[in-house]
Image: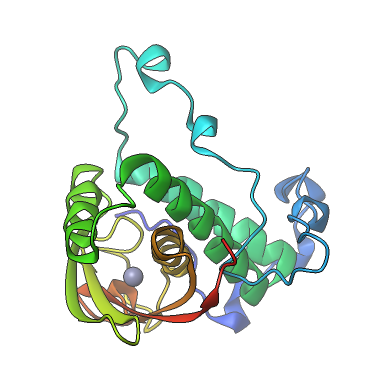
């Protein structure tokens, strides 16, 4: 049995890290790579300046004619949790989680722009999102409640790509998903969303549950 993340216990997380040789740390990563907000505009965790785009994913048909576009969850989690741990080692847990939310937000916005129809009414948009998340093997989404007046909703994702099957640490670990969901709905609505995971496989639940609400306008 192989686990792909260290314990997130703060006391044990720093174990031995101070003695790591420099080569264990990301060589090119620095705070300088963080996007700079446009002048006169505050950048929130859910509204990053963007340089990443769908184009960065490349031409998978050209590049992987034999292997195809899919890869094992193991490969995804190897990258995800090793990167997360490297960021925590360099910047601390809170900053690393914030960066994961920002990255998820960019991904969600790009996914919405490229795989979803933003012109659909909300109920059809949600149905399409559900279908795409299943097709892309990201998770099985179910909307538990939607309040269109207050723009608040609760949704679950079963068999979540990020966390399903992880050891139980009594914590939520899907910060990337929080940003991802916010990014999708920000792109769709033009509003800024705050998304919080309230249940997670890693916290002992068997689905991830997210509550989302609008907190402002994107100015788009
Ligand atoms: Zn989760």
Q: Residue at x 38, y 58 (%)?
A: 3
Name the quarter where the N terminus is drawn.
bottom left
Q: Residue at x 80, y 53 (%)?
A: 30
* Image location (x, y in percent) of residue 114: 39, 40
The mark total stands at 0
The front one of 164 and 64 is: 64
Image colouring: rainbow
* Image location (x, y in percent) of residue 127: 16, 58
Q: Quadrant of residue 130?
A: bottom left
* Image location (x, y in percent) of residue 205: 23, 80
Name the quarter where the C terminus is drawn.
bottom right
Q: Residue at x 51, y 75 (%)?
A: 8
Figure check: 163 above or below 65 = below
Q: Is residue 125 left or right of residue 42?
A: left
Q: Is residue 168 left or right of residue 207?
A: right
The front one of 157 and 122 is: 122
Q: Is residue 164 visible?
A: yes
Figure check: 57 above or below 17 = above
Q: Quadrant of ligand 1?
A: bottom left
């Amino acid at each position: 049995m192989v686990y792909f993340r260290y314990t997130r216990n703060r006391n044990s997380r720093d174990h031995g890290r101070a003695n790591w040789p420099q080569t264990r740390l990301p060589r090119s990563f620095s705070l300088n790579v963080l996007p700079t907000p446009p002048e006169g505009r505050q950048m929130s965790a859910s509204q990053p300046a963007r340089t990443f785009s769908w184009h960065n994913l490349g031409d998978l048909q050209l590049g992987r004619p034999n292997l195809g576009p899919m890869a094992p969850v193991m490969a995804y989690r190897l990258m995800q949790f090793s990167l997360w741990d490297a960021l925590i080692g360099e910047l601390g847990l809170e900053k690393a989680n914030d960066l994961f939310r920002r990255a998820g937000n960019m991904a969600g916005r790009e996914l919405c722009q490229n795989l979803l129809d933003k012109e659909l009414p909300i109920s059809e948009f949600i149905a399409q999102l559900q279908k795409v998340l299943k097709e892309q093997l990201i998770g099985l989404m179910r909307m538990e409640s939607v309040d269109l007046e207050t723009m608040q909703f609760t949704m679950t994702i079963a068999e979540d790509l990020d966390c399903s099957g992880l050891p139980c640490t009594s914590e939520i670990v899907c910060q990337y998903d929080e940003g991802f969901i916010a990014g999708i709905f920000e792109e769709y609505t033009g509003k800024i969303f705050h998304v919080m995971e309230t249940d997670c496989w890693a916290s002992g639940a068997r689905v991830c549950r997210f509550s989302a609400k609008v907190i402002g306008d994107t100015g788009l």
